[in-house]
Image (tube, grey):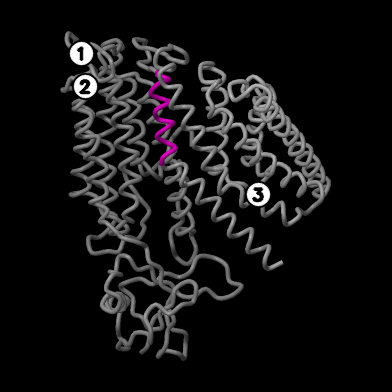
Amino acid sequence: MKVTLVSRSGREVVRGGIELSDSATVKDLQEAIHAKTKKYYPSRQRLTLPTKAGVSGKPVALSPKSKVSDYCEKGNSDNLTVVFKDLGPQVLYSTLFFFEYLGPLVIYPLFYYLPLYKYFGYDDTNRTIHPVQTYAMYYWCLHYSKRILETFFIHRFSHATSPLSNVFRNCLYYWTFGAYIAYYVNHPLYTPVSETQWKIGFAFGLLCQVSNLHCHIILRNLRSPSGNGGYQIPKGFLFNIVTCANYTTEIYQWLGFNIATQTVAGYVFLVVATAIMTNWAMGKHRRLRKLFDGKDGRPKYPRRWVILPPFF
Amino acid sequence: MASFFSTVKRIYLAIYNWAVFTGWIQVLIFAIKALNESGPAAVYDAVEKPLQLAQTAAILEIIHGLIGLVRSPVSATLPQIGSRLFVTWGILHSFPETRTHILVSSLVISWSLTEIIRYSFFGMKEALGFTPSWLLWLRYSTFLLLYPTGITSEVGLIYIALPYIKASDKFCFRMPNKWNFSFDYYFASLAVLGIYVPGSPHMYTYMLGQRKKALSKLKAA
């Protein structure tokens, strides 16, 4: 069969099209495109069916595991037109996460251990370090080490790769906020809260971190290792009452850190992170409710909090 | 009902645009008059009141974008208005030592020329339903020169204000305090200067894109 590959503006991407056997999979098509174009490796390719005039909605994306002939129209199994979009240079998700999290992990202890404040105009020589500042550093480093370990050993990603530009954007976010918070918590003029308050804060935060790890393990077990992502109804533990229990525990974990360390910088970060995660959670909740609508033998998605009981 | 609202909206926007237009005409006239009679050092005092009024009124434009009254994306209007307000109030008003600098003249002339064209462009659109093609051309071409001159003036004035900002405690909030918060206006100003580095090409290329769209529509018409 012959596949005609066009760009979204209608230009032919591979002149003359691509010849494939009738039983070829989309993965075979991707590899053929890569061979012909050299620079478009498979994870950079977004392949969709052309949209029909007057039909709304997102274009149908070709799934790598499916056969190319599955997408052909009835009676026309020798020819298929596929729309190609270049997603730009890609990196593995694990690469992206590793660099995002490495920044805060390294930057925060710099503010704790090194006499950096003299460059900001403060006398760094005879400072006393409060116990809470030490525990905060341990807590923070534990958190980001956990995230890195989860990236390599626990998470199963719905997509293998992410655009390279996200590395710069995400690192900017994490590294800037990391430095911003580290600056204030380790400051020579830092004012600690009462011992009771920071003990409660860290204890609560640790409890939420452990819960968060448990949530990640549950999510991992929803996806099979060879699968291409896909969605199941999350069950068990906090997922019985909240769709995005992993985000919930993450948010409350930062709340614990802030209760213990009490900085405006930390609370600003909490608000921004909550906004971002709430956005994701709404999308996920909507997707799951749409997918599991109770029709055609599919289970119906149960009524649950989206992300932050008891508010939302 | 819908057409009543759209008429009200049109009248409101027409009044808004022409009112701010007159503000900027005043700024330009007073600036040129001061330059002729006294020289660059006198420009600020001559334009201060209409400048502050016209520039601050632009805050309404962010609200217009947010509530959907106009189509301009907040991502393009916010940095522009933000930088204008920072320079008008945060630099010129707060640090009088900067007011006699020659960059004030280039700033005020760049801003007023751009805004006179922009507000009359939108004012005509709302009031008359169309804009003459020469005005459209001006709106989407003068920025090619006036953005660089304006941005250079803004950056320059912030830069010369830095030593005065550092020496002053204005707008600063110091530690220690129980919220472990501080705000240092000097560092904030440095950060603003930093934002100009990616911000200026972003705004310029945005306008270039708008120019292409607008002028090609003109050709097609």
The one nearer the camera, B170 or B68, is: B170
Chain designation of label 3 = B
Q: Which residue is mark 2?
A: A116
Q: Real-space Cα distance between discs 3 and 1?
A: 54 Å
Mark 2 vs mark 3: give the one in front.
Answer: 3
Hey, which quadrant is residue A12 in on the image? bottom left
Q: Real-space Cα distance between discs 2 and 1?
A: 8 Å
Q: Position of residue B46 (x, y in %)?
A: 67, 22
* Residue at x 79%, y 52% (from the top left corner): B129
The quarter in which the N terminus of chain A is drawn is bottom left
What segment is highlighted magenta in the picture? Answer: B183-197
Say whether residue B192 is magenta: yes
Q: Which residue is mark 1?
A: A124
Is residue A3 among the parts visible in the rendering? Answer: yes
The reply to whether discs 2 and 1 touch (Cβ–Cβ < 8 Å) is yes
Q: Which residue is mark 3?
A: B139
Secondary element type, mark 2: loop
Q: Position of residue A201 (x, y in %)?
A: 30, 21
From the viewer's perspective, is residue A312 above or below residue A225? above
